[in-house]
Amino acid sequence: MHRRRQQLRAKIIATGSYVPERVMSNFDLEKIIDTSDEWIRERTGIRERRIAHEKEAASDLAYEAAKSALKRADIKAGDLDLIIVATVTGDMSLPATACLVQEKLGIKKAAAFDVNAACSGFLYGLSIADSFIKSGAYKRILLVGAEVLSRITDWEDRTTCVLLGDGAGAVILEAADDDRGIMSTRLMSDGSLWDLLHVPGGGSRHPASKETVKKKMHYLKMKGNETFKIAVRALENLVVETLKENKLKLSQLSLLIPHQANLRIIQATSERLGISMDRVFVNIEKYGNTSAASIPIALDEAVRQGRIRDGDYILLEAFGGGLTWASALIKW
Ligand code: UT7
């Protein structure tokens, strides 16, 4: 444990991401279920998604994203104090995928654990990392969002399978003394709405059995339409509250990076807020919804495309199973 210091900020010093090689287009989906490229594009904005190789699990994707972030940070894995992985599709239910990433990185000293907050998982992880750094408990943290959603996808359910994809994104956070870094995070949840988005089988409520598999209980179930409406309202409030808390105007925001669940959710939220789409980052057309991986992949792409400059205010926001929703305001 390190000594508490005043005004310590958690700063993202590098980002990285990894998506599996295999591309599955809407046209590929047309061949296996009753859907069309036109419907998927118009209702979701998605054109294609990545699907992990059968030998790839969440820790493999997470490891690749982590390596890329470590390289860009120009630090060694051994310099990390803590590894957090946000995922709902970990390699196994035990141990934590973060421990498997630690093994792959070949380090022993760091602590490691997973966070399960579905699509908001990366931002929940960011909030935890921020608190640890501010408290002085840890100096350098690897946070990864990694998902292999294709493994919990019912490929016969057209209402969900067209939406989901696989991938991973990572950030390295470091304690910094200047005024840049994470300004605030906001975490919200409403457990009474858990059944809008869930995987019923395989846990202690309905342990895996022939029966649960036969009933397809190991697959993700979503009431899409209800979730959609709640998401738009919740995300609008979240952004307004986050800006208010930081005494910022919407016009001071350089970039909004939303969770990529549906282009129509992103557009509706932006419209309600009054922010033009050129200040909103969108890459859903390439990857679909990758849950906890969506924001860190988008953040990495935004950085690589030069869309974020030093001193910019950027706002990250997500919504997903739990229900959970969360935001983070960063001065880059
Ligand atoms: O990750 C965070 C949480 N997730 C979300 O935030 C996702 C939120 N929900 C959504 O993105 C949207 O609700 C969906 C994309 C899932 C669905 O779009 P929608 O506009 O809400 O469609 P709907 O569920 O109201 O369905 C409209 C019609 C239905 O047909 P009928 O009943 O009108 O004849 C569906 O059966 O579209 C049909 N449909 C499809 N048609 C072709 C549903 N899925 C498909 C499909 N292809 N893949």
Image (cartoon, rainbow, N blue to C red):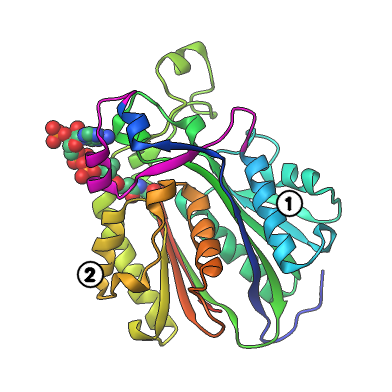
In the rendered image, the vertical position of residue 229 relative to residue 233, given as above or below:
above
Q: Position of residue 2 (x, y in %)?
A: 81, 73
- Looking at the picture, does residue 132 appear above or below residue 175? above
Numbered disc 1: secondary structure: strand
Label 2 element class: helix
Tell me if I can see residue 225 in this picture: no
Give left or right: position of 83 versus 189.
Answer: right
Q: Looking at numbered disc 1 in the image, what kind of residue is underneath it?
A: Ala
Residue placed most toward the observer, 29 or 87:
29
In the image, 44 versus 238, the foreground residue is 44
- Residue 171 appears in the rendering: yes
Label 2 to label 1: alpha-carbon separation:
39 Å
In the displayed structure, would residue 62 be above or below residue 151?
A: below
Q: Position of residue 83 (x, y in %)?
A: 71, 55
Q: Amino acid at mark 2?
A: Arg
Q: Which region of the structure is painted magenta? A: 31-57
Instruction: Residue at 74% x, 45% y: name it.
Output: 99
Q: Nearer the viewer, residue 3 or 328?
A: 328
Q: Quadrant of residue 94?
A: top right
Quadrant for the C terminus in the image? bottom right
**Label 2 crowding class (10 Å Cα cut-off): few <14, some 14-19, many 20+?**
few
Question: For the N terminus, which image quadrant?
Answer: bottom right
Say the numbered circle drawn on residue 272: 2
Q: Is residue 46 left or right of residue 13?
A: left
User: In the image, ligand 1 is in what quadrant?
Assistant: top left
Please identify, in this view, whether the residue under mark 2 or under mark 1 is nearer the observer: 2
Disc sitting over residue 112 in the figure: 1
State which quadrant residue 244 falls in.
bottom left
User: Dots 2 and 1: beta carbons under 8 Å?
Assistant: no
Q: Is residue 55 magenta?
A: yes
Q: Position of residue 14 (x, y in %)?
A: 66, 68
- Residue at coordinates 62% horizontally, 59% vertically from top-left? 16
